[in-house]
Image (tube, grey):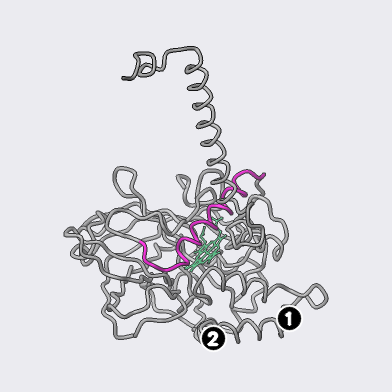
């Protein structure tokens, strides 16, 4: 028969034992948490590929530029709205796709690379990042590039590419042998590089097409999902960039032209969603989907204002591709979680640093509210 004291655990000795047990449990919990942080921070595996290592790479290649994004460092903020065509309503329950809905949009155009003061150049990859402000605080953030496919298919290949493309201090250029070895080990990247090289370079941001490259999923009201990739396709006809334009001496010509176009009239892109077939690759952004896949024009993005990056506007945002409203979901593409982690790392570093004005600062701001 157990005695009353055993059941209640009330004696001085059992009290001390209980306190020790509790302290032990708390100690175990703290050690577990510390271990989790160390694991997440990559401190337990210094050779492992982590978001910190990727962002360190960007910093090594580009030099220190406190306060700026570690990639896509040179940019300009924008604002406007999205007008839904209603064509996406059947496939996604996101409110922004409901027929007739108008959703406020803010965003940023930028040039790829970690140099915030680099002169605009024709061949630099351009980007369009948008943030759709849905009711009740819901958001959709999407970053898109003006290339047909992404050069690598997973974070390890991204890391290998950064290493291979690192400029040799003696020549200031990447080592051709290292690049050759990278492409030999990554034939999918060699194919993607030739598609990227063959793209038409348009006269500016306003007549350029920007693509999600990664695959996502639309989620309908009944839970049905459809694999998709999307593109912002300019309403104005695309014009190829002329050699004279590419040789302009003004260092911000692409950004200044865009701000001027927005001041003249709004700049518009159609949001075109391509519907993937069951066999289309959703986990490999180096591979295009067949051109005959059906697509829907789900609405129009109308940019009405631009403003230089400043306190509290698009400068202080992280366009994490996994910030999605109900009705949109990620895919099995390994680049998505890698992007999410790397952008958070870049954001955390830059948020804590002193800020310098953007190179794109003399653009007359039309957007006091941006
Ligand atoms: C593993 C692959 C990738 C890595 C490590 C990476 C890294 C980065 C980093 C560190 C930033 C700066 C983030 C910030 O401070 O806010 C950035 C910005 C950006 N990235 Fe990526 N990226 C990757 C893949 C992609 C892909 C596939 C796209 C597809 C379109 C993309 C589009 C963009 C855009 C548009 C921005 C600029 C967003 C803005 O204006 O703030 N990136 N990237």
Q: Which of these two is toward me, 299 or 226?
A: 226
Sequence order check: which comes first, mark 1 or mark 2?
1
The residue positioned 27% from the left and 71% from the top of the image is: 297
Q: Which mark is residue 187?
A: 2
Looking at the image, which residue sits at the far front?
1
Q: Quadrant of the N terminus?
A: top left
Percent x, y for residue 16?
Answer: 52, 18
Q: Cβ(mark 2) to ligand 1 < 8 Å?
A: no
In the image, 125: left or right of 226? right
Percent x, y for residue 231?
Answer: 38, 71
In the image, 64: left or right of 270? right
Given this view, does label 1 or label 2 mark the residue nearer the observer?
2
Instruction: Choose top left, top right, bottom left or bottom right for residue 250.
Output: bottom right
Percent x, y for residue 107?
Answer: 45, 56
The residue stretch that appears in magenta: 330-354
Element class at badge 2: helix
In the image, 340: left or right of 217? right
Q: Which of these two is toward me, 258 or 65?
A: 65
Determine the CA span between mark 1 and mark 2.
18 Å
Q: Is residue 8 above or below residue 202?
A: above
| Residue 299, magenta (yes or no) | no
Element class at badge 1: loop
Residue highlighted by disc 1 = 175
């Amino acid at each position: 028969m157990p005695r009353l004291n055993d059941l209640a655990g009330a004696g001085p000795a059992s009290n001390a034992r209980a306190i020790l047990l509790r302290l032990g449990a708390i100690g175990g919990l703290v050690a577990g948490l510390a271990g989790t942080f160390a694991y997440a921070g990559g401190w337990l595996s210094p050779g492992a590929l982590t978001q910190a290592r990727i962002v360190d790479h960007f910093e090594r290649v580009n030099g220190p530029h406190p306060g700026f994004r570690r990639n896509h460092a040179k940019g300009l903020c924008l604002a406007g709205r999205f007008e839904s065509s209603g064509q996406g309503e059947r496939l996604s329950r996101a409110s922004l796709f409901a027929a007739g809905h108008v959703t406020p949009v803010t965003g940023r155009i930028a040039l790829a690379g970690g140099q915030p003061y680099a002169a605009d150049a024709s061949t630099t990859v351009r980007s369009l990042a948008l943030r759709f402000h849905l009711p009740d605080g819901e958001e959709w953030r999407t970053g898109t590039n003006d290339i047909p496919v992404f050069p690598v298919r997973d974070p390890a290949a991204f890391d290998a590419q950064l290493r291979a493309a690192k400029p040799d201090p003696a020549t200031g250029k990447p080592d051709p042998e290292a690049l050759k070895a990278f492409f030999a080990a990554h034939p999918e990247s060699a194919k993607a590089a030739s598609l990227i090289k063959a793209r038409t370079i348009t006269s500016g941001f306003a007549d350029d097409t920007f693509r999600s490259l990664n695959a996502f999923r639309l989620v309908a009201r009944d839970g049905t999902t459809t694999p998709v990739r999307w593109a912002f396709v300019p309403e104005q006809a695309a014009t190829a960039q002329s050699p004279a334009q590419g040789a302009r001496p003004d260092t911000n010509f692409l950004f200044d032209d865009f701000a001027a176009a927005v001041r003249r009239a709004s700049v518009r892109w159609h949001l075109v969603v391509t519907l993937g077939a069951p066999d289309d690759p959703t986990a490999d952004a180096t591979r295009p989907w067949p051109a005959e896949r059906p697509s829907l024009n789900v609405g129009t993005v109308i940019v009405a204002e631009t403003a230089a990056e400043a306190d509290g506007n698009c400068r202080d945002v992280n366009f994490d591709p996994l910030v999605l409203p109900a009705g949109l979901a990620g895919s099995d593409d390994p680049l998505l979680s890698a992007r999410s982690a790397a952008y958070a790392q870049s954001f955390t570093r830059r948020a804590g640093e002193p800020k310098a004005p953007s190179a794109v600062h003399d653009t007359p701001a039309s957007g006091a509210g941006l």
